[in-house]
Image: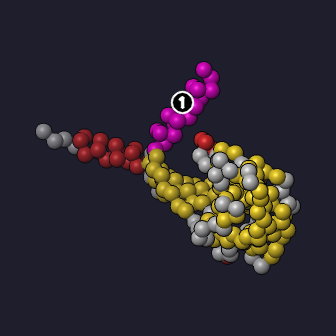
Amino acid sequence: MPTLASPAMLFFYCVFLLSNCAHIVQTREEYVVAGEGPVVNGARLSAEMLTTDGEVKYSLSAMVYFAAGEAETGPYKCLLTAWGDRGSHRAMTVERLTVRAEGRQESVPASRRIAFAPGSNDQGWQATYVIPGVLSLDYEAGSDVVLDARIRIHKSRGSVTRNVSIRLQPAPEKDVKFATIIDEFRKGRDEFDSANF
């Protein structure tokens, strides 16, 4: 037999669930290589821009719904990587490197001889030059980043040097995740437990 208490309980239950709901929008202001990277002595070159900062914003709507936005933005750390063959590629040397972006140009120090080694989780055979310093870019301007370099790739049977150019273009990525405050409480409790036992 229906009673007045049932709709009231259902209403308060819904309000409780909504007040504990949240969504997190993560936006990454990334740069990706345009097309395939150049090849030097059988090794394919690529570049990567890693964000070094982030901004988190929170909002509350009518005390009901909680939302957070996180943007991973620059300045950027830049990596230049050669992907080779484990059986023959030995090292990479960056003899000259210039970075062009937003109408300006900057020369970067040459690298030492960088040995090829297994990548993360033993994936790939690579030599990576972490370019010194960081790049401050106006992502909203939509400017490309161009790396002009003179690269020497050393193999077991000699080495080859080439002038190459790698272009990176802005490519934002957005990811939306849903969670509840109860989930965050449980996550925090689990982290506390693991830290103390």
Residue occupying the point 53% across, 61% down: 174
User: Label 1: which residue?
Assistant: 190
x, y percentage for residue 24? 52, 53
Note whether 15 is above or below 134 in the view shown.
Answer: above
Q: Is residue 43 magenta?
A: no
Residue 80 percent location from the top left of the image: 72, 59
- Residue 60 located left or right of residue 78: left
Which amino acid is tagged 1? Asp
Q: Residue at x 60, y 20 (%)?
A: 197
In the image, is residue 161 above or below residue 68?
Answer: below
Left-right relation of 90 to 15: right
Could you say whether the residue bearing mark 1 is in a helix, strand or loop? helix
Which of these two is toward me, 31 or 95?
95
The N terminus: image quadrant = top left
12 relative to 155, above or below: above
Q: Examine the structure image and report whether residue 194 is included in the region drawn in magenta.
A: yes
Nearest the eye: 196 or 30: 30
Magenta-highlighted residues? 180-197
